[in-house]
Amino acid sequence: MADNIKMRAQLKGDVTELKVLMTHPMETGRRKNDLDEVVPAHFIQLVTISLNGNVVTEAQWGTGISKNPYLTLHLRGAKVGDMVAVVWHDNKGQSARHEIAVTAG
């Protein structure tokens, strides 16, 4: 499901700017559709970001995150060619993973 995550990691000086766009409906479970039926909750619960296989951050999310979440992080210690991976898991057991190499900015 790598199509669900778009990423860019650029080294600018000694800081790598990581931009991540995740395609996900992020339904709260409180919205009603046109037929006045409650749309079931469907949201990302855990996001893990790692650099060369080492976890650099984890985030636990809930229903307060908007549809198609966008994330920007700044990492220190990365070099051009290092691998950055993003993995998410949602409340319905689905997950996605994407990995890219750090490029010069």
Image: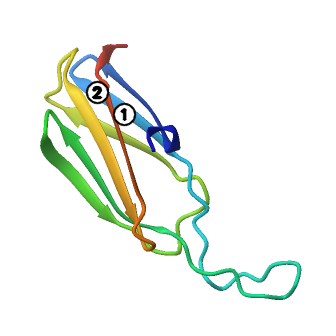
Outermost residue toward the top in this view: 104
The residue that appears at 44% across and 39% down in the rendered structure is: 2
Q: Is residue 89 above or below residue 62?
A: above
Quarter of the N terminus within the rendering: top left
Residue 46 placement: quadrant: bottom left
| Separation of residues labelled 1 and 2 (CA atoms) | 6 Å
Residue 24 horizontal/vertical position (percent): 56, 56
In this figure, which residue is indicated by the disc labeled 2? 16
Q: Nearer the viewer, residue 91 or 18?
A: 91
Residue 45 horizontal/vertical position (percent): 39, 69
Q: Is residue 80 above or below residue 19?
A: above
Residue 102 horizontal/vertical position (percent): 28, 21
Q: Are marks 1 and 2 in contact (CB under 8 Å)?
A: yes
In this figure, which residue is indicated by the disc labeled 1? 18
Q: Circle 1 sits in a helix, a strand or a loop, which is it?
A: strand
Quarter of the C terminus within the rendering: top left
